[in-house]
Image: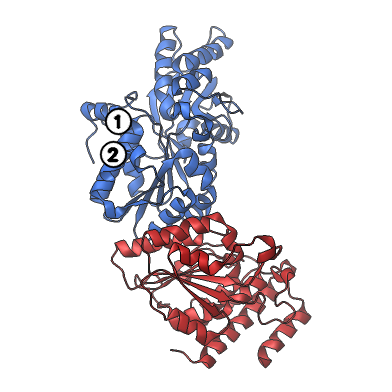
């Protein structure tokens, strides 16, 4: 595993989350763990697995266009000390093979790491068949499943390395794209299940996950210029949720979740479920995809048309802050 | 090699336990139909063919059985009891109360259960992954046996896996098709005709054998055949085999035994 340096984070951000995981981290994992396998369903090249294929042809398995088979085979391989990384587009991985994930990976506690690429609407003009904004909901409801959605390429790098040594099924939700925004540029104690505090503010907390974390960072900078200073949390692990962190927010005036995902079943729902079970005075707002199929387009367009870009988050938080009056 | 008598005695013992589990389950019933069609297959595999060590269940060189048609759970439990993985108490408690032994078995290596089956069409991919792992670990000692139902072959995922097994050259796999000709709603021909099962598997690249799935010696012979390819054994069976009132009857897919039928089933077992 490599050090987290400014230089590395720049290199990885150019590769993006998918490129870093598939082109850099998986290669290192195969080098250091002899019982590690990488599987794909006809998306080896697209995912950036060329070096993995060339260097480890014996531990790279392409099952063709058969996602159910992908997950079943990965679960069978993840036995006797093995760890199997199965990757394809998040939509096909989590939806076509949902039952295999539930029964073969979750129920059997198989040491499978599911890497969903092009999560959200990262794949732009491909349209809704290739988008996935239901996958967090689907994965987090499966017992034993850990769900991680990194904020940037560096965090994706750290998450996949940590998933490799964690025993049990993990879903890692990756955003695509090259030259992605950098959230982490230096050594960072990433830990599955432990949220990251990016800004300590007051009254309002923005809880974001995945590729839109950097949009939230930009929104916070703009809000600070107005004198509004929200707390900002990168909730990279949706399951298990960092309840200790959320507990500290229970009496904030407002919590605003931000996710490139449906507002049903994702981070917003997970936070709501936790808050409703404890004594709290806070109010919850959820920014995400409303209960609809989005109008497709480039990722930036879909983000902005659903209020998920920095401008949309800024405007939303500002509105909430203003609704509290001058004391907020 | 085991004698016909030894293997038939084992099958008889398994049926006795399976009837007991079904009867104990009360009016919820059990999958007696598809359970009874695989009794001889399991008796021969566990009694004469497979290598395993009950005192060392995770022994690397053991043969693995993937019960993809988890509906045969009661017969799997009966086989596991016969060879010592499960106790009589566990059999007596199965399928009711807080037992760990449900209709569809849950993976439990210590008890000899390799796979959580029940949702059809998933076992062959899992077996393929298992066999890939064995190959990569240079274990050429273990075989992987996968039992599929014929109705189960309606599932598209079976055929995804079927191609994989050939593509990856997993010749340590033997697929056993329990061809009892019935599924939940009727005959397999009537509900979803799958064409010629033999030529379907042959065309993908398997060595295909056909056998009377209730003839223990014929099964023993077929499982001893060596191939340079993955194998498919099409076992012609009778759903509900052994219970005259249930044989080839669709309504016995899942059904319960009244005390009278339980006694009758046991009686028929003793005179056969």
Asked if the residue under mark 2 is in contact with the one under mark 1, i.e. CB atoms within 8 Å, the reply is yes
Q: Could you tell me which quadrant the C terminus of chain B lies in?
A: bottom right
Where residue B20 appears, x then y in whole percent?
66, 78
Nearer to the camera, A315 or A192: A315
Q: Secondary structure at mark 2?
A: helix
Characterize the local packing of mark 1: few (<14), some (14-19) or many (20 or more) Cα atoms within 10 angstroms: many
Q: Is residue A42 above or below residue A131?
A: below
Residue at mark 1: chain: A
Question: Can you give x and y, in whole percent of width and height, for residue B174 in the image?
Answer: 44, 71
Mark 1 vs mark 2: tell me if same chain.
Answer: yes
- Identified at 55% across, 12% down, the residue is A319
The tint of chain A in the picture is blue
Quadrant of the rendered structure where residue A20 is? top left
Q: Is residue B39 left or right of residue B170?
A: right
How far across and how far down the image is residue A322, in percent? 55, 9
In the rendered image, the vertical position of residue A50 relative to residue A104, given as above or below: above
Label the red chain with its letter.
B
**Image mark 2: chain:** A
> Residue, x 68% and y 61% (percent of image)?
B191
Q: x and y percent of residue B207 in the render?
A: 44, 71
Q: Which mark is residue A15?
A: 1
The CA distance from mark 1 to mark 2 is 8 Å
- In the rendered image, which residue does mark 2 sit on? A23
Whichever of labels 1 and 2 marks the residue nearer the N terminus, that label is: 1
């Amino acid at each position: 595993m490599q050090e987290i340096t400014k230089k590395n984070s720049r290199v990885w951000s150019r590769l993006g989350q998918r490129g870093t995981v598939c082109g850099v981290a998986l290669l290192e994992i195969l080098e250091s763990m002899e019982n590690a396998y990488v599987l794909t369903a006809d998306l080896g090249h697209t995912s950036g697995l060329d070096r993995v294929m060339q260097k480890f042809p014996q531990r790279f398995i392409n099952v063709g266009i058969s996602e159910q088979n992908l997950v079943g085979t990965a679960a069978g391989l993840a036995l006797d000390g093995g760890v199997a990384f199965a990757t394809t587009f998040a939509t096909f991985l989590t939806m076509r093979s949902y039952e295999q994930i539930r029964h073969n990976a979750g129920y059997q506690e198989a040491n499978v790491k599911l890497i969903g690429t092009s999560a959200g609407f990262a794949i732009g003009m491909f349209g809704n068949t290739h988008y996935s904004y239901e996958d967090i909901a689907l994965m987090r409801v499966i017992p034993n499943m850990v769900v991680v959605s990194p904020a940037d390429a560096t965090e994706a790098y750290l998450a996949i390395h940590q998933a490799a040594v964690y025993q049990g099924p993990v879903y890692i939700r990756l955003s695509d794209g090259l030259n992605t925004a950098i959230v982490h540029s230096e050594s960072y104690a990433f830990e599955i299940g432990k949220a990251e505090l990016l800004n300590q503010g007051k009254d309002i907390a923005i809880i974001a996950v995945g590729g839109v974390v950097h949009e939230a960072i930009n929104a916070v900078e703009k809000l600070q210029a107005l004198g509004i200073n929200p707390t900002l949390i990168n909730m990279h692990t949706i399951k298990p949720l960092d309840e200790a962190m959320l507990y500290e927010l229970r009496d904030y005036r407002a919590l605003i979740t931000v996710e490139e995902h449906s507002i049903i079943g994702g981070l917003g729902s997970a936070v709501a479920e936790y808050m409703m079970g404890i004594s709290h005075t806070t109010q919850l707002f959820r920014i995400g995809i409303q209960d609809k199929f989005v109008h497709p387009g480039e990722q930036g367009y879909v983000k902005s048309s659903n209020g998920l870009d920095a401008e949309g988050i800024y405007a939303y938080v500002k509105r909430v802050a203003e609704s509290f009056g001058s004391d907020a | 090699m085991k004698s016909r008598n030894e293997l038939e005695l084992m099958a008889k013992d398994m049926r006795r336990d399976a009837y007991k589990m079904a009867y104990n389950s009360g009016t919820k019933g059990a999958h007696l139909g598809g359970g009874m069609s695989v009794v001889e297959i399991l008796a021969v595999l566990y009694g004469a063919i497979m290598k395993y060590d009950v005192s060392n269940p995770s022994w690397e060189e053991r043969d693995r059985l993937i019960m993809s048609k988890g509906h045969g759970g009661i017969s799997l439990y009966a086989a596991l009891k016969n060879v010592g993985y499960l106790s009589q108490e566990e059999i007596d408690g199965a399928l009711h109360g807080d037992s760990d032994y449900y209709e569809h078995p849950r993976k439990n290596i210590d008890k000899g259960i390799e796979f959580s089956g029940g949702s059809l069409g998933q076992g062959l991919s899992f077996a393929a992954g298992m066999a890939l792992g064995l190959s990569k670990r240079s274990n050429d000692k273990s075989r992987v046996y996968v039992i599929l139902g014929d109705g189960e072959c309606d599932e598209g995922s079976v055929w995804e896996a079927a191609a994989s097994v050939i593509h990856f050259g997993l010749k340590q796999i033997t697929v056993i098709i329990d061809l009892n000709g019935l599924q939940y709603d009727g005959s397999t021909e009537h509900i979803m005709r799958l064409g010629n099962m033999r030529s379907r598997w042959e065309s993908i690249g398997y060595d295909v054998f056909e056998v009377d799935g209730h003839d223990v010696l014929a099964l023993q012979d077929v499982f001893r055949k060596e191939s340079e390819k993955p194998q498919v054994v099409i076992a012609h069976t009778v759903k509900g085999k052994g219970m005259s009132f249930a044989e080839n009857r669709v309504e016995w897919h899942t059904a319960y035994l009244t005390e009278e039928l339980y006694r009758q089933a046991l009686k028929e077992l003793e005179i056969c």
